[in-house]
Image: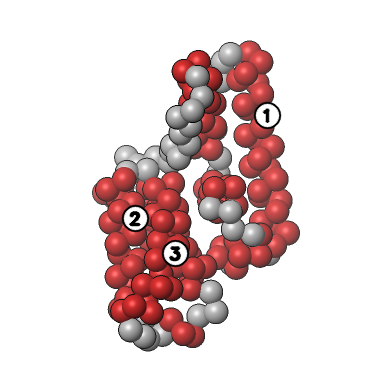
Amino acid sequence: MTQTEFLNVVMPFKDKVFRLAKRLLVSTEEAEDATQEMLLKLWNNKEKMAEYKNVEAFSMTMTKNFCFDKLKSKQAQNLKIVHTNYEDKQTALQKQMELNDSVNWVSKIIEDLPDLQKTIIQLRDIEEYDLDEIAKMLDMNNTAVRVNLSRARKTIREKLTNTHNYGVK
């Protein structure tokens, strides 16, 4: 595989790799390092990439595993999961503050989810993978993915509703 072919295959999803790494590692620097590490691994194995039916799914699985390994290491004990992808510059300041507050609440709620549910929420609702791809990436049954996704969404919905209704967590 030539460098051009490699770039044509990998570049369309490199941002997704970064976002998943950022979701799992929080630190932008750590996520950049993880993304670079994944791209380097793909480059080193570019001749084998033809064997993979879905290079993107393979890369996301590699990224997830790398990030989990990093989180398990002693040097990553202080990392936490945060989501700050949303920004809308056209809304009024009050509305923007409310939206930011809601995103922050959702981030806090997602932090409290079990690791599997956090990962599934990231892959499905943020990265927009379909359930079959997620099941394959996580080596799970499709039904188990749907159940975990449903439970995670229900938890987020209930806690966010309680927060908005009562003003406290």
Q: What is the number of callouts on the image?
A: 3
- Label 3, secondary structure: give it: helix
Q: Is residue 161 above or below residue 130?
A: above
The amino acid at mark 2 is: Lys
Residue position marked by numbered label 1 in the rendering: 158
Q: Is residue 122 above or below residue 62?
A: above
The reply to whether dot 1 and dot 3 touch (C-beta < 8 Å) is: no
User: On the rendered structure, is 152 left or right of 11?
Assistant: right
* Residue toward you, 137 or 140: 137
Q: Residue furthest front?
A: 90
- Quarter of the image that includes the N terminus: bottom left
Q: CA distance from mark 1 to mark 3?
A: 35 Å
Which percent across, then down, holds residue 130?
A: 64, 59
Q: Kindly indicate the quadrant of the structure image that contains residue 144.
A: bottom right
Residue drawn at 66 percent across, 40 percent down: 153
Which percent across, then down, holds residue 99?
A: 53, 25
Residue position marked by numbered label 3 in the rendering: 12
Which percent across, then down, holds residue 88?
A: 48, 32
The reply to whether dot 2 and dot 1 touch (C-beta < 8 Å) is: no
Residue position marked by numbered label 2 in the rendering: 70
Q: Kindly indicate the quadrant of the structure image that contains residue 10.
A: bottom left
